[in-house]
């Protein structure tokens, strides 16, 4: 077995990270617009005001995606661009932008995969309590219906939320992301519960209103655990760790995926979170648990786990001088074998890798090109592991490289470059990096050149 003929080779980006035009054509404020105005919150006080100027350059970007041969592009919609107040009056110009973008993608042979929410939450709704307000799931459902009504004649692949672990956990607990709150854990869990309800209601809206048969999932993240050896004990220990909760934060797989797929919060989490558990109204778990067509997961790295020999698990210390990306995330290609394998076993859904890639030190070399051999090596290693998983029978249907182009990396601003297309932020000029040309060959050969890289 290998990559199937219809394997979805894609790349991804998100609205706030690339669009710019933050104050144009009637767009409302997002919590990231306001976060970026607070000195010291983002590296060098960078903002997404202009970013990659994708709002104006989307045609060129769609053409480049076509040139690379992408089968699919995972984009997100800026909620406040479409609904400046989060609910109520539609900003037609904002909605029209996505209409044109979808057309441009299709004209270039690229299928749009739409993420409804990738962190640029409407500031107006934040002022009404944001995710802490129980109405937030209805606000999200209203927004979803506007998008589905407009785009679902041409869009069939949908993701509700991107990395709730981050936009709830990091944004509401450690405060490093917008809106920058440091709430008590009970409030964090309440926000999480409302976000899960929003997911469930959005799936319902998509299923009832879509004009073309929809495929729906979410793009989750969490800890990927890998066994230190192939021994049964280490594999069991890694599996156990991957699906357990052992401390009071949201950075795990099961607090999110179990309610979405099984309709229950995991027992171990409920025990640890006991006194902070939110009130769960009748029917909530049923609302959250809607049939899904795929499990989307963002995987960049993983933790290596060894059995303690007595049913326990411990993480293996890093070797001295481990390979690191510029985010200082360890390079762990096997995460793209074990992550999909464990997730597919537990949740029984086809897997889509909705993000994978690396931050790197890229600059224009003296020959005018952007040579990024580390990224090519990184991607070749990770994709080879993904192929290995498929060969072993894991149902993986697609892969979205993060990212199609360099972009605003949240609190790191423009310090980090994740793209396979280089963006000169001063001029907006785009240049394909070596990795883009390499990925083009990967796609054209349906993964066959991986063996030769
Ligand atoms: O840039 C982010 C993206 O928005 C969400 N997932 C991780 C990426 C790299 O940090």
Image (tube, rainbow, N blue to C red):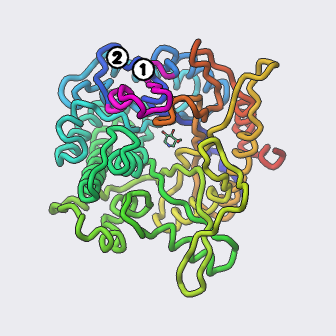
Horizontal placement of 274 versus 409: left or right? left
Residue toward you, 385 or 300: 300
Query: Which dot marks residue 49?
Result: 1
Q: Quadrant of residue 100?
A: top left
Quadrant into which the C terminus falls: top right
Residue identified by numbered label 2 = 23
Q: Please report the bounds of the magenta region as a residue range.
A: 31-51
Who comes first in sequence, dot 1 or dot 2? 2
Outermost residue, right direction? 452
In the rendered structure, are the residues bearing label 1 and label 2 in contact, judged by CB atoms less than 8 Å apart? Answer: yes
**Image: 124 above or below 359:** above
The image position of residue 409, as x and y in percent, is 51, 34
Residue 86 point in image, percent of width and height: 24, 31
Q: Residue furthest front?
A: 40
Q: Is residue 112 visible?
A: no
The residue at the point 34 percent across, 41 percent down is 180
Tell me residue 179's x, y (percent): 32, 38
Front in this rendered view, residue 140 or 320 = 320
Seen at 61% across and 32% down, the residue is 419
Q: Count residues near mark 2 (Cα–Cα under 10 Å), then give few for <14, some for 14-19, many for 20+.
A: few
Above or below 197: residue 269: below
Give the SS element for disc 2: loop
**Which mark is drawn over residue 407?**
none
33 relative position to 312: left or right: left
Q: Which quadrant does the N terminus fall into?
A: bottom right
Label 1 to label 2, Cα distance in Å?
7 Å
Q: Is residue 1 visible?
A: yes
Residue found 32% across the figure and 55% down from its top? 290
Q: Report if residue 33 lies within the magenta region.
A: yes
């Amino acid at each position: 077995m290998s990559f199937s003929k219809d394997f979805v080779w894609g790349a991804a980006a998100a609205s706030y990270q690339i669009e710019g035009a933050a104050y144009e054509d009637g767009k409302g404020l997002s919590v990231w617009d306001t976060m970026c105005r607070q000195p010291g919150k983002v590296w060098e006080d960078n903002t997404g005001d202009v970013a990659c100027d994708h709002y104006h350059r989307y045609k060129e970007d769609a053409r480049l995606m076509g040139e690379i041969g992408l089968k699919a592009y995972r984009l997100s919609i800026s909620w406040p661009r479409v609904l400046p107040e989060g609910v109520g009056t539609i900003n037609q110009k904002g909605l029209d932008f996505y209409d044109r973008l979808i057309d441009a993608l299709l004209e270039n042979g690229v299928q749009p995969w739409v993420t409804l929410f990738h962190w640029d939450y409407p500031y107006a709704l934040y002022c009404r309590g944001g995710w802490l307000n129980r109405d937030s799931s209805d606000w999200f459902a209203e927004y979803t219906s506007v998008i589905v009504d407009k785009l679902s004649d041409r869009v069939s692949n949908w993701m509700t939320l991107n990395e709730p672990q981050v936009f709830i956990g990091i944004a509401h607990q450690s405060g490093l992301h917008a809106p920058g709150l440091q709430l008590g854990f009970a409030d964090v869990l309440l926000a999480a519960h409302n976000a899960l309800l929003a997911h469930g209601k959005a799936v319902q809206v998509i299923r009832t209103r879509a004009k073309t048969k929809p495929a729906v999932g979410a793009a989750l993240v969490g800890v990927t655990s890998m066994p230190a050896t192939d021994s049964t004990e280490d594999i069991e220990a890694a599996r156990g760790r991957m699906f357990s909760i052992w401390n009071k934060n949201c950075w795990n797989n099961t607090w999110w995926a179990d309610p979405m797929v099984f309709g229950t919060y995991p027992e171990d989490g409920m025990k640890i979170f006991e006194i902070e558990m939110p009130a769960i109204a009748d029917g909530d778990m049923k609302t959250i648990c809607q049939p899904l067509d795929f499990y989307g997961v963002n995987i960049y790295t993983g933790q290596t786990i060894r059995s303690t020999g007595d049913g326990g698990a411990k993480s293996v210390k890093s070797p001295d001088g481990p390979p690191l990306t510029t985010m200082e995330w360890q390079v762990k290609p096997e995460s793209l074998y074990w992550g999909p394998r464990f997730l597919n076993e537990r949740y029984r859904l086809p897997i889509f890798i909705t993000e994978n890639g690396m931050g790197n030190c890229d600059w224009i070399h003296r020959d005018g090109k952007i040579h990024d051999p580390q990224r090519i090596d990184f991607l070749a290693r990770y994709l080879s592991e993904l192929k290995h998983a498929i060969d072993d029978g894991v149902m993986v249907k697609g892969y979205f490289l993060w990212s199609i182009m360099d972009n605003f990396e949240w609190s790191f601003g423009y310090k980090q470059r994740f793209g396979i297309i280089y963006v000169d932020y001063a001029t907006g000029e785009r240049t394909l990096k070596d990795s883009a040309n390499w990925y083009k060959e990967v796609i054209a050969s349906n993964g066959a050149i991986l063996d030769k890289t």
